[in-house]
Image: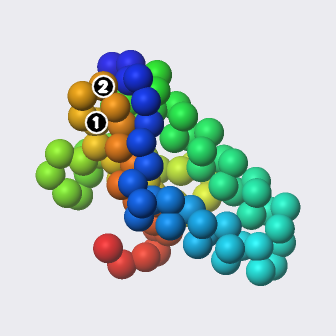
Amino acid sequence: MVVNEIVFTELAQEDLRAIKKYICCDNFSAAQVVVKHIFERIENLKENSSIGRAGRVLRTRELIISKYPYIVPYQVRDNSVYILRVLHASRKW
């Protein structure tokens, strides 16, 4: 299914800011690379919204970010993909 737009929830936006801030403490350019990679993977959902695995929460899916330890839970509704969070894989849900 091709979707029209990707919508980031406020929590997902906060997660991305926190990821960038945390990595920036050690390496600014690495932080930019990681966040850019996450955005690129999320953009792939426009072409194929079902590439993520079935989610742990009903009616969600989870995009595994290859190369980095992040999981992006999302929902597909009305031709839009809603990015719910961007979580480190070792984080307790």
The quadrant of the picture occupied by the N terminus is top left
Is disc 1 placed on a helix, strand or loop? strand
Residue drawn at point x = 84 percent, y = 61 percent: 29
Residue 9 image point, x, y percent: 39, 54
Q: Quadrant of the C terminus?
A: bottom left
Q: What residue type is labelled 1?
A: Val
Give the residue displayed 35% in from the left and 44% down from the top: 82
Q: Is residue 48 visible?
A: no
Q: Do the residues labelled 2 and 1 touch (CB within 8 Å)?
A: no
Q: Alpha-carbon neighbours of circle 1 within 10 Å: few (<14), some, or many (≥20)?
A: some
Residue 11 versus residue 74 in the image, above or below:
below
Q: Which residue is drawn at 60% across and 45% down?
A: 39
Q: Position of residue 68 (x, y in %)?
A: 61, 58
Q: Name the residue under label 2.
A: 79
Question: Viewed as shown, does residue 51 lie left or right of 14?
Answer: left
Is 90 left or right of 74, judged from the image as shown? right
The residue identified by callout 1 is: 76
Relative side of 22 to 92, left or right: right
How far apart in space, not on screen, are marks 2 and 1 (Cα)? 7 Å
Percent x, y of residue 80:
34, 31
The residue sitting at 43% across, 30% down in the picture is: 5
As drawn, 35 above or below 49: below
Q: Can residue 78 be seen in this view?
A: yes
Q: Where is residue 52 in the image (x, y as percent from the top left)?
A: 37, 41
Residue 10 sits above or below residue 36 on the image: below
Q: What residue type is labelled 2?
A: Asn
Mark number displayed over residue 68:
none
Most distant residue in the front direction: 10
Few, some or many residues within 10 Å of mark 2 (<14, 14–19, 20+)? some
